Amino acid sequence: MPASIRIVLIEDAAPFARALQKYFRLGDEPIECGAIYPTAEAALQALPQDPPDLALVDVNLPGMSGIECVARLRTTCPDLLCLILTMYEDGPVIFDALKAGACGYLLKRTPPAEIAAAIVQARAGGSPMSPQIARQVVNFFHRTPAPDGLAVLTTREREVLELLANGSMYKEIAATLGVSLDTVRTHLRKIHEKPPVHSRTEAVVKYLGRST
């Protein structure tokens, strides 16, 4: 049996959170959903003591926003993956969440089975997005010129970034482009080595035309 993925929910809508927690407990994916935190402040106080593998984070929380919570968790718990789960599908919110360090962005209307699959994908190194979010990201990319500093990217490197922005995992990118997994890793490593790109999330955000 694969090791369980330990997750928490940072969500103030209690019925929604409990229903999702119950689904994970009874579902087929190896997901262990522990605590539910109704505020960012509560999560920030508790999680550094025993960080899980992943946190599902709502954007609209009482007090501190989910985006600010992600930014702070990325500092206090650098190995913790933060996956946004929200109703908001506005462009600025999406990009602010990615800049804060979110590994993906899902809408709450996503079926529970797909949320579970996205958690597994994120834990394996992917950047899952709901189709509506991925469409906005790619559309923004198509209508926005590449910013300074990314003009040196090759055509293949740009293709890798676009697939990554759509939430594809490395093996899916490799299959789509007809290259090996090692080649995908090499392209990403070269992208990371081109200043001022220092992380996968930052590379996607910069490529989509948003300065950090």
Image: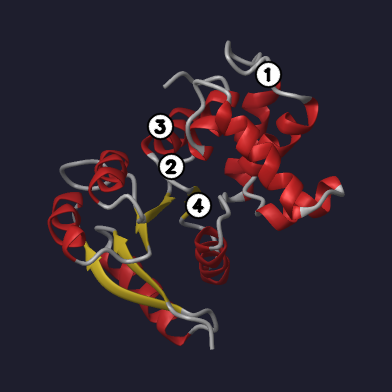
* Marks 1/4: CA–CA distance: 23 Å
Look at the numbered disc 1 and give the secondary structure of its residue: helix
Label of residue 143 in the image:
1
Position of residue 179 in the picture relative to residue 168 (left or right): right
Image quarter (top left, top right, bottom left or bottom right) of the N terminus? bottom right
Pointer 4 or 3: first along the chain:
3
Kind of residue at badge 2: Tyr
Pointer 3 or 2: first along the chain:
2
- Few, some or many C-alpha atoms within 10 Å of disc 4 (few <14, some 14-19, many ≥20)? many
Q: Quadrant of residue 13?
A: bottom left
- In this figure, which residue is indicated by the disc labeled 4? 106
* Marks 4/3: CA–CA distance: 14 Å
Kind of residue at badge 4: Leu
- In this figure, which residue is indicated by the disc labeled 3? 96
Label of residue 88 in the image:
2
Position of residue 131 in the picture relative to residue 172 (left or right): left
Position of residue 207 in the picture relative to residue 33 (left or right): right
Q: Position of residue 179 (x, y in %)?
A: 83, 49
Q: Position of residue 64 (x, y in %)?
A: 19, 41
Pointer 4 or 2: first along the chain:
2
Look at the numbered disc 2 and give the secondary structure of its residue: loop
Look at the numbered disc 4 and give the secondary structure of its residue: strand
